[in-house]
Amino acid sequence: MAWVNQDKCAIVGVGATDYYVRGKSWPRTINDMAAEAIMNACADAGISHKQIDGFSYYSTAGAGYLDKFDTASLMETLGMPHISWSATLTSGGGGCPGAIGLATAGLMNEDCTYTVTLMALQQLPQHRLGVVFGAAAPNPENSFLQPSGLVGPGHLMSVLARRHMHLYGTTQDAFGEVVMATRANTHNRPKAVRKDPLTKEQYDASVMLADPLRRLDFCLETDGAVAVITTTMDRAKDCRHKPAVVHAAAHGGQREWGRAFAWMGMPDPHFASSGHKFTADRVWAQSGLTAKDMDVALIYDHFSPMVLMQLEDYGFCEKGEGNEYVLSGKLRYDPATGKGVNGGVPVNTHGGNLNEAYIIGMTHIVEGVEQVRGTAINQVKDAEFALVSGGPASLPVSSLILRKD
Amino acid sequence: MTYGPARALPGDQIRITTNPDTEPFWQAAKEGRLTACQCGDCGHFRMPPTAICPECGSRAKNWPTLPGTATVFSFAICNKNPKNGEDYVYVPVVVDLDGAPGTRLNANVSGCDAEDVHIGMKVSVDWTPIQDGWVLPNFKA
Ligand SMILES: [Zn+2]
């Protein structure tokens, strides 16, 4: 059944800071970067930052584990006269597109008029996202994981990837193709961190960090901030750009994905998956669409195998066929035609977390907006629908479909 | 790739904490007894131990002694000690526990070369003393 809030709200503004290699943003503070991203997003929308009256966050309004920002300090920083909506999607980075659904809830409830969704990330030496699990004090739950030395997100993902390889014959070559296909989209992006062309030889020479995953299978470690403004369609008509219409938004997950990062108890076939099947099914049911209807897919790519597994969970290919789908080049964007390759849907036309920047999924939302506006650097021809995903991570994970107005 | 012998992480670098739901598992480990949390009413196993059976809602728990054998479900090969970054080959494994259907442990495996670890491999429990007098179940090939 179609989502009751379908096409009633839109993203009208996107804004970001520069992207910095981990730790290089200092002496800027996290509030400085957050505020700049918000003000840039407001300028993009053509509104004043003092018109914002709602916050819709994920990941505990911060990277979840690192330096935090919050509604009170942002209100003070930006001089907002009042707010009437402040809500957070629980769990971690898997909630980023789901936070747009949360914004929609506030807007449709007439609690607020312009809602900002934000991530600001600063990884100083004492706060490095990639090692926080391992550095965390032992607690009764992580005492069943930490002693194994599965201390970083990449370690955890490598175990899932290994099982996928075992069950379906998936190869490291496919992980490499995810990295190369998305790297090919950053050479023309001024702010991208990794812009040089990547060969298979270079990928194969990349140091093995958690076998079967190489350094290049890991996303970037980046500092910076990204903000997006969501409002109702009637207000969106008065904004500067064409609205990126919120066509469907879902978050959640099913019990078989379990505690995911915090434990490895998931049964097959969920173990060798991205844990997205539930939200994928929901977002397709809400929209009446399928993967094949998407013109572009912005897939959360903290680790390359998880792109392959999401392509399966969203139905771009069948479960277990991700290896073949990826290796046939179907992730690639062809600049000559502005379309996909070999009948595929272009993935991460902005380069993703692996190559452009890792602001915990927010850059994927920005790219989705620009694609349906028709202003993307690597514009997909006649892009009408863009899928944005958040996670795999602990539940909830989330999905968003943006539509051209 | 060739990694050479898989070694468990040094026990003196490992600390755990417990709560009333998990403590019986670790007390049993101190006695060299591998157990898992079993519902006292419906018999369903769950790990890590939690307050309430997710199947039937019961708070009753059993802590049966398991055979101490397991099967490798998946694994990674890591080559840096997470505490100090030094070169150190270890193999985190996720194992299915014999005698407690549906339960797993995350551990290290030793007694073979890292590159010889494989899914489906049979392993048996191997106790590693860790900080504060606790004992950690690892596995050997
Ligand atoms: Zn029970």
Image (cartoon, grey):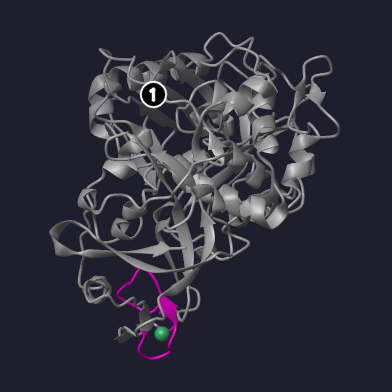
Residue A275: x and y in percent read: 56, 53
Q: Is residue A5 above or below residue A187?
A: below
User: Where does the magenta region start and end?
Assistant: B39-56
The residue sitting at the bottom extreme is B41
Residue B104 vs residue A286, the one in the foreground: B104
Identity of the residue drawn at 53% across and 64% down: A256
Residue A339 is at least partly visible in this image: yes
Q: Say above or below: B140 vs A351.
A: below
Tell me which corner region of the image, top left, top right, bottom left or bottom right, holds residue A351: top right
Badge 1 amino acid? Gln
Instruction: Give the residue number, with chain letter if any, for mark 1.
Output: A51
Work out which quarter of the rendered image holds the N terminus of chain B and state it. Answer: top right
- Front one among A273 and A63: A273
Q: Is residue A311 left or right of residue B39?
A: right
Q: Is residue B52 magenta?
A: yes
Horizontal side of A52 relative to B30 (left or right) equals right
Mark 1, other Cα within 10 Å: few <14 / some 14–19 / many ≥20: some
Q: Give above or below for A340 relative to B55.
A: above
Residue A103 placement, left or right of A306: left
Classify the position of ligand 1 by quadrant: top left, top right, bottom left or bottom right.
Answer: bottom left
Rendering coords of residue B78 (x, y %): 44, 42
Percent coordinates x, y for residue A127 in the rendering: 27, 30
The chain ID associated with circle 1 is A
Give me the residue at 30% from left, 75% from top.
Answer: B51
Q: Quadrant of residue A343?
A: top right
Residue A318 rendering spot, x and y as whole percentages: 76, 52
